[in-house]
Image (cartoon, rainbow, N blue to C red):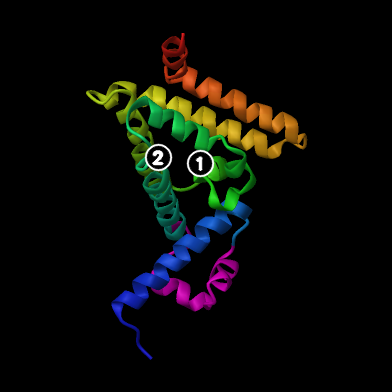
Amino acid sequence: MRYGNEHKQATRQRIIESAGRRFKRDGIDGSGISALMQDVGLTNGAFYVHFTSKGNLVATTVADQLQAQNASIVAHAAPGRAGVEQIVRWYLSAQQRDNPGDGCPSAALLDEIARCADPTKQAYTDGVLIVVDGIAARLAPDDPRSVRTRTLSAYAMMAGTLQLSRALADRRLADELLEQGVHNALALLGVEHEHAMASN
């Protein structure tokens, strides 16, 4: 039985979304094609109808995950600096820490992405800049590029903080680390200082 284009696209998207959860939970190297296809109830052979290689799936999934992060969080945050604080507090939350399969691909996969081929690194670069530019546009609406590197640095610090909080056995310390991370990220982005001044 032959399926139409819509069915093929829907199946491809199901594979991408399922792979995103599995990659973030088990790692890219720890996720074989068999397991990925089993997750969506398809055979290994069906994989090659949608992707040329596992590398092709990884690049596509990384881009999709970052676009989803941008669409669900960054795009819906309040405008201006209040939105920056909203994004930072969401990112460095216990909910994010405790649900890596549904969380940020950067915090879950950065070390593996660094070892991937150039197409995956390019997909990651393009995707992460969409997220970073969404934050930068709230910091400097007239010239977002002027704060792009600083915003990217804050994003990197946030991803590292989230990774470390996931690795700590001491839950209280992990919670304190997240709260300190919020303070540090907002200070780096120049948001916290302004809020402190406004409340004096």
- Label 1 sits on a secondary structure element that is helix
Q: Are marks 1 and 2 in contact (CB under 8 Å)?
A: yes
In percent of width and height, residue 199 lies at 45, 13
Numbered circle sitting on residue 106:
1
The picture quadrant where one finds residue 124 is top left
Residue 108 highlighted magenta (yes or no) = no
In percent of width and height, residue 10 lies at 38, 71
Q: Is residue 81 visible?
A: yes
In percent of width and height, residue 54 lies at 48, 61
Q: What's under tag 1, amino acid-wise?
A: Ser
* Residue at far right of view: 170
Residue visible at 41% across and 14% down? 194
Query: To which residue does mark 2 refer?
Result: 128
Circle 2 Cα neighbour tier, 10 Å, few/some/many (<14 / 14–19 / ≥20) = many
The picture quadrant where one finds residue 57 is bottom left
- Label 2 sits on a secondary structure element that is helix
Circle 1 Cα neighbour tier, 10 Å, few/some/many (<14 / 14–19 / ≥20) = many
Q: Which of 144 and 5 is in front in this view?
A: 144
Q: Main secondary structure of the magenta part?
A: helix
> Does residue 195 appear to the left or right of 97 in the view shown?
left
Q: Is residue 117 above or below residue 137?
A: below
Residue visible at 57% across and 70% down? 39
Q: What's under tag 2, amino acid-wise?
A: Val
* Residue at far front of view: 200
> Does residue 143 appear to the left or right of 183 in the view shown?
left
Residue range highlighted in magenta: 32-55
The picture quadrant where one finds residue 133 is top left
Residue visible at 40% across and 53% down? 64
Quarter of the image with the N terminus is bottom left
Q: Which of 25 and 188 is in front in this view?
A: 188
Q: Nearer the viewer, residue 54 or 67?
A: 67
* Residue at far left of view: 142
